[in-house]
Image (cartoon, rainbow, N blue to C red):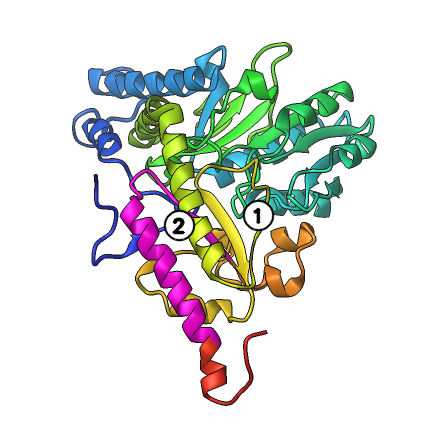
Amino acid sequence: MIAVMTDDLIYLDSNATTPCDPRVVEAMLPFMTRDFANPTTRNHRPGRDAATGLERARATVDRLLGGSAASEVVFTAGATEANNLALMGAAEALDGRGRHIISQATEHASVLEPLAALQRRGWEISLVGVDERGRVKLDELESTLRDDTVVVSLMLANNETGTIQPVRQAAGLAHARGALLHCDAAQGIGKIPVHVGELDVDLLTLSAHKLYGPKGVGSLWIRRRRPPIRLTPVIHGGGQENGLRSGTPNVPGAVGMARAMELAAEAGESERVRVAALRDRLEDAILGAVDGSSRNGDAANRLPNTSNFSITGVEINALLASLPDLAVNTGSACASAHPESSPVLLAMGVPDELAGSSLRLSLGRFTTEEEVDRAAARITEEVIRLRDMPTRMGRGSHR
């Protein structure tokens, strides 16, 4: 078992990022030191070797997604850029057909913010609601679709609760009205099977660092058949990545992403079962020992590694500060600089007090049973201690 952190710190924030698997690093190293040339330079062997590595990585990503051609994969600097390319690129390309885009209230900021930017430029954006489990309301989606709707954007799995969305059903509704279906699968890839045909998507966003690949690389899968999807680029320059993403390609990053996806596919169902069992062990221990704790999300239909629950009677930042030996989070890592009640949980109808006292624990490939037991004991211990402090100091008691 590979040690993820030092100093006995237990890492339970894998939805924020994961360590680069040593086997991924090994695959990347030759393209940093030997085959380092610019892959767009084809008039010498080093450039051709780098280009070969890049195209092999592209073909691997497409194959593992169940795609039909390597040209369907555009490498980007991450999922945020891929989401921007998907949404802004599709909006611009389809401007003549309509200016209405639909998403849901619990999407990641890398979807909601590009949509807000498009709204400021004249596009009409509709955000449909979710139920108490965090699943999109398909009936509301169907009633919101219009003839001028050009894109529906729906994440595969929520980064805070792990709730898995009914993407295929949403795609059927979108396609029936002539709209594209974009899916942000950054949290799902590597944790659950992701197959573009089974999901019936037109655009799919991926991130490498969420599945033990390097940071700074992602990809956008673009359907190229029946009929091919056309996008307008959002980054202009030398016309790399089939004209959709200018800039010198990150060959080591692309190779690392492809290798990370291979390793996830090789681990398969056995790893999903292992991680889900550890998650349930951790969750059951905490919820069983801590009064006033409650699970958030869809217990039966979520990522195997993700647990989100609320704890009453403690100030959540005080709890986090009392756990320096645990790496845990309150929600989206991208929003952690702005602590407040989770908009995702509020959209699910979770009361403000509970939405503001939630913890997200996300396990990973290197999480052990011993770490899970230690983490459960530490969280329980600190909750009891913090709840007891006002009582001992004469300032009230646990709510």
Instruction: Say what secondary structure mark 1 lies in.
Output: helix
Give the residue number, with chain letter if any, for mark 1: 109
Q: Which residue reaches farthest front? A: 288
Residue furthest bottom as drawn: 394
Residue for point 16% across, 26% down: 34
Res 13 label:
2
Please state if 286 lies on the left or on the right of 40 as rendered.
right
Q: Is residue 364 left or right of residue 343?
A: left
Query: Is the C terminus in the top left, top right, bottom left or bottom right quadrant?
Result: bottom right
Q: Which residues are magenta?
A: 359-387
Disc 1/disc 2 C-alpha distance (Å): 18 Å
Q: Nearer the viewer, residue 37 or 197?
A: 197
> How crowded is the residue under tag 1: few (<14 C-alpha within 10 Å), some, or many (20+)?
some
Percent coordinates x, y for residue 115 in the rendering: 66, 43
SS assignment at label 2 = loop
The spot of residue 156 in percent (x, y) is 56, 33
**Residue at 83% over, 33% down:** 143
Contact, mark 1 vs mark 2 (Cβ under 8 Å): no
Q: Nearer the viewer, residue 73 or 309?
A: 309
Q: Is residue 179 left or right of residue 15?
A: right
